[in-house]
Amino acid sequence: MSTWLLPENIADVLPSEARKIEELRRRLLDRFRAYGYEMVMPPLLEYLESLLTGSGGDLNLRTFKLVDQLSGRTLGLRADMTPQVARIDAHLLNRQGVTRLCYAGNVLHTRPRGLHATREQMQTGAEIYGHAGLEADLEIQQLMLDALRLAGLAKVRLDLCHAGVLAALIEADPAAAALGDALYEALACKDVPGLTELTAELAPLTRDALRALPSLYGDASVLDEARKRLPALPGIARALDDLAFLTGKIEGAELMIDLADLGGYAYHTGVMFSAYVDGVPNAVARGGRYDKVGEAYGRARAATGFSLDLREVARISPVEARSSAILAPWRHDEALSAAVAALRDAGEVVIQALPGHEHDLDEFACDRVLVERNGVWTVETHA
């Protein structure tokens, strides 16, 4: 095997792609800051028990593990940053009011989420803590749609779900509770035959409700159908009321209801959402409410947020990131050096062509040139 080969579903990011990713990263983080979100940078690895606290078995399977040579304890390479940000809010910041946090960093998965997906994602997202009302859900969803708009992704479809529907059905039926993880997985994968088999021995009311969830998909009218087909449990009624409120408030996306869209992590407790764009089979961004994650760190906090893989978004984004630049000659000249420095300080990209390499500029669009006219260095349009 060649020593330069990379593991499966792991790839280098080359200059043109990296420039586009960085352009989008800056746009998104600047927009998060405009909403009042503060950036945090959790570590890439933590002690495993801390990293997976309150996150569920799915995240455990996706997490790389290794032994710390200093302590002998097991470490995990993060597969998701949300539990880390929840830990920061619960233990390090310890604020009493609303806290808005954002992040951008790499995560690693033991297995890819799709056939051609990378196992190293650049997860970018935002979280809001300390407010249990739907106003926080609405803000985070609008922020996500704003971020996708800045990435040039038009005609976004937003699918809304609610973890409270499945939770209410499981809570009302002990037999269903024993199948909780399996039911969650079957619904998340839209595995209708598997769901049929799992529910065969359940009480008719629970069985019929669970089997109905995959078909409860469509516009806001699905909520009326759900009220007719699902049991009149308080938890289900609250969940459907939450979804009805949001469908009347969200702007900038086609809204759909999908009561089986549980494709996130099992720590979600309330409204869940997924954003889709034409031509891409998988969601480009996901999020939802996860009020119980912080509880595992000793401080329960209402929380909701979203994340996206910036590498995947960059791949489908029409945003042009090829930099406009100024071409300058290379020579020992104090006036030239001063002119180049002034242009760079003003935010311009200035490339000095090294002797013999005047045309090696594939990654930049040098539409201007720095030339000397009567002893003065000036910028002119590149012929």
Image (cartoon, rainbow, N blue to C red):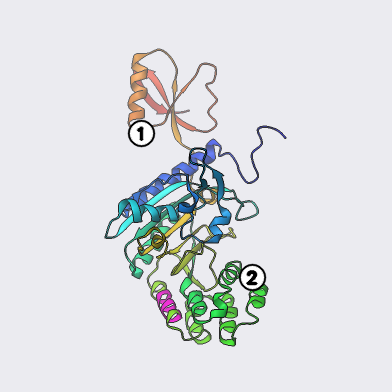
Left or right: 372 as drawn, with respect to 8: left
Which residue of the protein is positioned furthest toward the right in this rendering?
A: 1
Report helix, strand or loop for mark 2: loop
Q: Which mark is residue 347?
A: 1
**179 versus 318 height, above or below:** below
Q: Examine the rendered structure and indicate whether residue 368 appears above or below residue 119.
A: above
Which of the two residues, 16 or 373, is positioned nearer the viewer here?
A: 16
Q: Which residues are magenta?
A: 236-244
- Residue 227: horizontal and vertical position, in percent? 48, 84
Q: Is residue 165 magenta?
A: no
Q: How many marks?
A: 2
- Tell me which residue sits at (35%, 59%) in the image: 128
Q: Is residue 329 left or right of residue 186?
A: left
Which image quadrant is residue 196 in? bottom right
SS class of the residue under badge 1?
loop
Which amino acid type is shown beneath numbered disc 2?
Asp
The amino acid sitting under disc 1 is Gly
Left/right placement of residue 129 relative to residue 115 reads left
User: Does 241 appear in magenta?
Assistant: yes
Rendered residue at 34%/22% (across/down): 339
The disc placed on residue 191 is 2
Viewer-closest of 342 and 105: 105
